[in-house]
Amino acid sequence: MLYTELTSSAQKEALERFKAKGFPTNKWEEWKYASLKSWNEKDLDWAPAPLNETSSASLQTQNGNTRFHGALPAGVEFISFDAFIAANPALAATWEQRLPILDQNSLYDLNIALTLNTQVLWVKAGVSVDQAITHDYILSVAKASAVQSRLIVYLEADANLTLIERAFTIAGSAEVLSNFVQEIYVSEKANLTYVKEQDLAQNTTHIDHTFITQLSDSQVDLFTFSLNAAYLRNNLHFYSDGENVVSNLNGLYVPGEDQLMDSHTVVDHRKPNSESHELYKGVLLGNATGVFNGKIFVRPDAQKTNAFQSCKNVLASTRATMNTKPQLEIWADDVKCSHGTTTGQLNEEALFYLRSRGISLANARTLLLLAFVQEVIDRVTHEETKLRLTDKIISKIQTSLAI
């Protein structure tokens, strides 16, 4: 995209910030183990052609263009961001003064500069959407390309929504860098269940920035399942900006041969009497690289906060590498907080027990690995998604172990 095609001064300023920094390298502390330096030297198509793929999903993002197909549920609107602000002028100031994004980086600036199709999924007050809305995030390009996309989800007070996101690459696509930003607002007494299924091709680099703001008495249950991609980075930021907020973060990553998966989470407690529960698990196959960097902030006004973080990993290969960095920053004194991480290999005694009952080594390893990740999978209440994820994880583990 040419500089002169940018429509606003904000876009041009964001592009200048990106050009000054370039893609993140391992000299950046937050990208120490997940450099994107090689993309600085690539000849990229910055505006790949739109797609006309068929999909059973009602919400579709195809090469950055987001549309809704079929009838909208009662009490739900899907409109452009400009139309949303026009319908809610009181939110304009809120938007301009929204909470700062921690660890803001050049890729967020790139997204601001080049995204042309920002849409809003808007659930009205008191509306409970009975059926899950499925969002297919689809990539396919003819030459090496960078795809930018942005989606805003806004739940008014007392609203309820289940959102199932499936990210994938169409067979035959050229190399693609996907830069996806979501800003989600969960108002008072609203509830959101959000499942991300990331199953992309080996020539795909996918960076997902998800920022979730919660107001009083709201609850968010978020699941991130990272299954395939050459490079997968999830920047997940929660802003607990009300009392009695519940934030549940669940993650499972299964990187395989020549794959890197990086989970960066931030939970920022700003008001009292709220809680967050964070459980991440990883199974690393082949020569995979995994990264987990989890931060919990408890601000001075956030008394009586309960915040818990756990990251557990199994190296299923002697060639795999895991880098973890759990962090707590607490400025309040009446809180309950903990964080911890473990990385190890399968228990040899458990393997011996299974093999002594006639189970092959590969099958025994598969059973133990599946038992390890089942805690995260079982928390998904959408049965169709749970079964699909289980089948994919089993298949990947078995393929890696050559069963």
Image: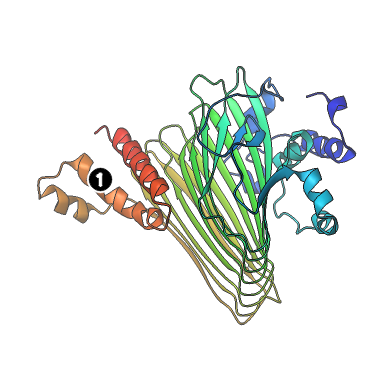
Q: Tell me, yes or no, if residue 33 can be seen here.
A: no
Instruction: Please give left or right for residue 352 compared with residue 238 in the image.
Output: left
Which residue occupies the foreground of this view, 95 or 313? 95
Instruction: Please give left or right for residue 45 compared with residue 174 in the image.
Output: right
Q: Whole-percent x and y of residue 236? A: 60, 52
Residue type indicated by callout 1: Arg
- Count the marks: how many? 1
Which residue occupies the foreground of this view, 14 or 218? 218
SS of the residue under disc 1: helix
Place residue 321 in its image quadrant.
top left
Q: Whole-percent x and y of residue 68? A: 63, 38
Q: Tell me, yes or no, if residue 198 can be seen here.
A: yes
Q: How is the image coloured?
A: rainbow
Q: Whole-percent x and y of residue 396? A: 35, 37
Place residue 44 in its image quadrant.
top right
Residue that sits furthest to the right in the current view = 9
Q: Please identify the quadrant where the N terminus is shown.
A: top right
Q: Please identify the quadrant where the C terminus is shown.
A: top left
- Residue drawn at x 62%, y 52% is 74
Instruction: Please give left or right for residue 19 compared with residue 187 in the image.
Output: right
- Report crowding for label 1: few under 14, some 14 to 19, many 20 or more residues within 10 A (C-alpha): many
Q: Is residue 114 above or below residue 44?
A: below
Location of mark 1 (residue) = 365
Which residue occupies the foreground of this view, 137 or 232? 137
Instruction: Please give left or right for residue 177 compared with residue 319 in the image.
Output: right
- Residue drawn at x 64%, y 79% is 303
Q: Whole-percent x and y of residue 226? A: 47, 43
- Residue drawn at x 60%, y 37% is 35
- Residue drawn at x 65%, y 77% is 272
Q: Is residue 283 above or below residue 229?
A: below
